Image (cartoon, grey):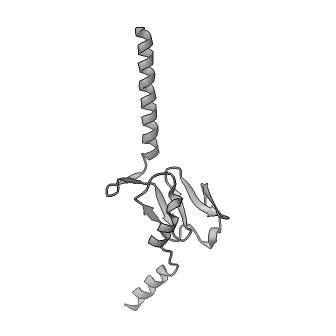
Amino acid sequence: MNAIQKIFYCAMISNTVLSTAQETHSNKNLILDPSTNCHIRYYYYPNLEAYFDRETEKYIFRDKGQWKSESQIPSGYRGYGLFNKANIAINDYDEDNITQFLDDHRKKYPYNSLRKLKTNSTASLD
C-alpha cells in the first residue's frame, strides 16, 4: 500500500507541476498592466479594425463578415498597410474573445487617416 500511495502522490505532483507550467508559459512574454491587473495580450489596429494576439502570435480580422485568426494579414487587406499606422495596446482585457469589444474600440480609438498630415502641416506653420 505504501508503494501505491507514493506512485499516486508522484502522479498528483507531476500533474500539478505540468498544469502550472502551461499557465505560466502562456503569459510569460506578456506584460502585466498594474493599473488593470491584465496582461497586455492584444494590440488593436484602428486602420484595419483588427487585432494582434501576442499569446498566439496571430492577427484577428474580419474577412467577408467572418472573424479569422491567421499569422499574417492578407496583402492589401482593406487597402491599408500594417506597419504604416499606429496600434494600441489593449490593457483592460486578456481573455480569449477580444472581438466582442470591436465597437467599443472603434469609438475609443477612431481611425484618422489625416492625423499624420495634420501633425506635419501644424508643425510647418509654427
Where in the figure is residue 112, as x and y percent of width and height?
Answer: 50, 78
Left or right of 38 on screen, residue 43: right
Task: Looking at this view, name the residue that lies furthest to the top.
Answer: 1
Residue depicted at 61% across the width and 63% down the height: 62
Residue depicted at 43% across the width and 82% down the height: 119
Residue depicted at 44% across the width and 26% down the height: 14
Quarter of the image that includes the N terminus? top left
- The quarter of the displayed image where residue 16 is located: top left
Depth check: 107 or 72 in front? Answer: 107
Q: Is residue 119 above or below residue 3?
A: below
Where in the figure is residue 43, as x and y percent of width and height?
Answer: 48, 61
Where in the figure is residue 99, as x and y percent of width and height?
Answer: 53, 60
Where in the figure is residue 42, as x and y percent of width and height?
Answer: 47, 58
Q: Is residue 46 above or below residue 40?
A: below
**Quick check: can you spot residue 82?**
yes
Depth check: 11 or 115 in front? Answer: 11
Residue depicted at 43% across the width and 62% down the height: 89
**Quick check: can you spot residue 109?**
no
